[in-house]
């Protein structure tokens, strides 16, 4: 990643953080729904296993991908608690 991309991503992250902080601190009637939605989006886990299985069916030689090759552990690979 180049320094320009790093700076751009950092700027976007700061802007999003300020936006979330502003929504939380505004304490207006319509911001409560926005807060609840943000909490839902940020705390929902996404299981991408079915998508990867679909890709494995369609594209047989994806072993070079770490996720499909099994060289990296993913939180989605852990059994449910």
Image (cartoon, rainbow, N blue to C red):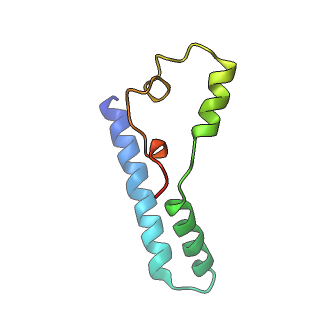
Q: Which quadrant of the figure has residue 28?
A: bottom right
Where residue 49 sits in the image (x, y, percent)?
58, 39
Residue drawn at x 53%, y 55% as measured from the top left: 45
Q: Is residue 64 above or below residue 53?
A: above
Where residue 67 sits in the image (x, y, percent)? 46, 29
Q: Residue at x 54, y 74 (%)?
A: 35
23 above or below 15? below
From this view, report whether residue 34 is shown above or below residue 6: below
- Asked if residue 27 lies left or right of residue 56, the reply is left
Q: Quadrant of residue 7?
A: top left
Q: Nearer the viewer, residue 73 or 13?
A: 73
| Residue closest to the eye, 60 or 80 | 80
Q: Position of residue 56 (x, y in %)?
A: 62, 23
Judge from the rendering whether residue 35 lies leftward or rightward of residue 22; answer left or right: right
Disc tally is: 0
Horizontal placement of 59 versus 77: left or right?
Answer: right
* Residue in front for this viewpoint, 78 or 22: 78
**Where does the image place residue 29, in percent across and percent down from the top left?**
61, 86
> Does residue 76 appear to the left or right of 34 in the view shown?
left
The quadrant the N terminus occupies is top left
Residue at image point 40% right, 43% down: 9
Between 23 and 73, the residue placed more toward the observer is 73
Question: Which quarter of the picture shows residue 16?
Answer: bottom left
- Residue appearing at x 51%, y 85% in the figure: 27
Which residue reaches farthest left?
A: 3
């Amino acid at each position: 990643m180049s320094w320009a991309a790093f700076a751009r991503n950092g700027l976007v992250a700061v802007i999003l953080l300020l936006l979330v902080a502003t929504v939380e601190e505004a304490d207006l009637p319509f911001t409560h729904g926005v807060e609840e939605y943000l909490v839902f989006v940020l705390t929902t886990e996404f299981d991408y296993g079915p998508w990867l299985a679909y890709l494995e069916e369609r594209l047989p030689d994806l072993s070079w991908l770490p996720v499909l090759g099994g060289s990296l552990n993913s939180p989605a690979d852990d059994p449910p608690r």
